[in-house]
Image: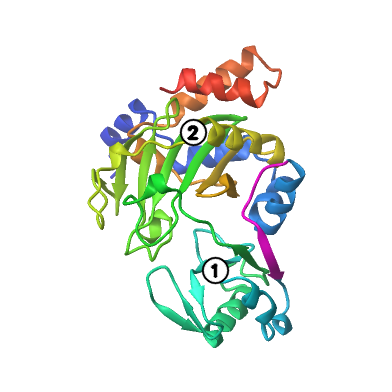
Amino acid sequence: MINFGIHRLLRQKGILGMNQRNTDYIGRFNNRKYYPIVDDKLKTKQRATQFHIPTPTLITSLSTQHEIKYPQKWIEEYKAFAIKPSKGSGGKGILVITEHDGEIFKKPSGQTLTLFEIQHHLSNILAGLHSLSGNLDTAIIEELIYMDEIFEGYSHEGIPDIRIIVFQGYPVMAMVRLSTHSSDGKANLHQGALGVGVNIATGQCIDAIYDNERVTHHPDTHKKLSDLQLKNWNELLRLASGCYEMSNLGYIGVDLVLDKFKGPMLLELNARPGLSIQVANKAGLIPRLQQVEAFKHTHPMLETVEQRVKRAQEWFI
């Protein structure tokens, strides 16, 4: 039996559901011809370079099984790195190495892997084990990101990322994703990371969910989550907003990271961002999306990134 009471309550809170997201926003505002730019991380990185949007430095990319047999060139040069599938999603297939001696490789958790296991992981990526379509893929090896000091005690065994939903170029909702021991250092909610809502106007963290439950403190470090204030917040918003022109997509999830030495950088884009960001913010997306649409109806000219960020900070306090 359909629970009309729950549906009415969700509508009152402005919660965006999966079907409405797909038809009213992704279907209307995301032209499928632009999907390859966001579904392929290597293409995203190349496109970002053209638009002067910083991303983690690419060490190399591997596209044939033959290349996996001879990884010594880049392994000898880099002591720490991250391996990713170019067409992966949800954090699947990402392997972070923090140090190695050429034969034994250490993950952020302290777990060790042999060179054979690294090669086996690369082989699985190329075979498409982690790709969106299941087709053959490319392995990306990037320089390691170093966690900014503001996240000390807020993220366990991994680097946090910042997800911002951008609609027609306007940042409308944000959350920080913090890794935990159970997420194996990854910042994906469905793998056990924390989602912490962020005030668009100020960058102050406001609420959090963990394993579908509301929480106030990090489960591993017990640090109070609402005390976290993101630095470089305006720059993060400008970076996210600028991804509108870069991607040509009207409704996107922009994943950013704060590197200790290099500052804000783009990790990846998502043309079908999840909806749990609403739970982390205790707010629905619909009123914010409608506000942008109403404004665009009366102001059809494209505003600059600075104008869009300023307006979003005035609207979404």
Picture residue at 48% right of the left edge, 69% below the top: 98
- Vertical order, 221 against 205 (above or below): below
Picture quadrant where residue 189 is located: bottom left
Front in this rendered view, residue 20 or 263: 263
Q: CA distance from mark 1 to mark 2?
A: 27 Å
- Decide whether residue 56 is among the magenta residues: yes
Residue 80's label in the rendered image is 1
* Magenta stretch secondary structure, dominant: loop
Residue 278 image point, x, y percent: 39, 37
Does dot 1 land on a helix, a strand or a loop?
loop
Q: Sequence-wise, which precedes: disc 1 or disc 2? A: 1
Q: Quadrant of the C terminus?
A: top left
- Decide whether residue 244 is among the magenta residues: no
Contact between marks 1 and 2 (CB within 8 A): the answer is no
Image check: 101 left or right of 134?
A: left
Q: Amino acid at mark 2?
A: Trp
- Vertical order, 128 against 211 (above or below): below
- Vertical order, 141 against 124 (above or below): above
Residue corresponding to mark 2: 233
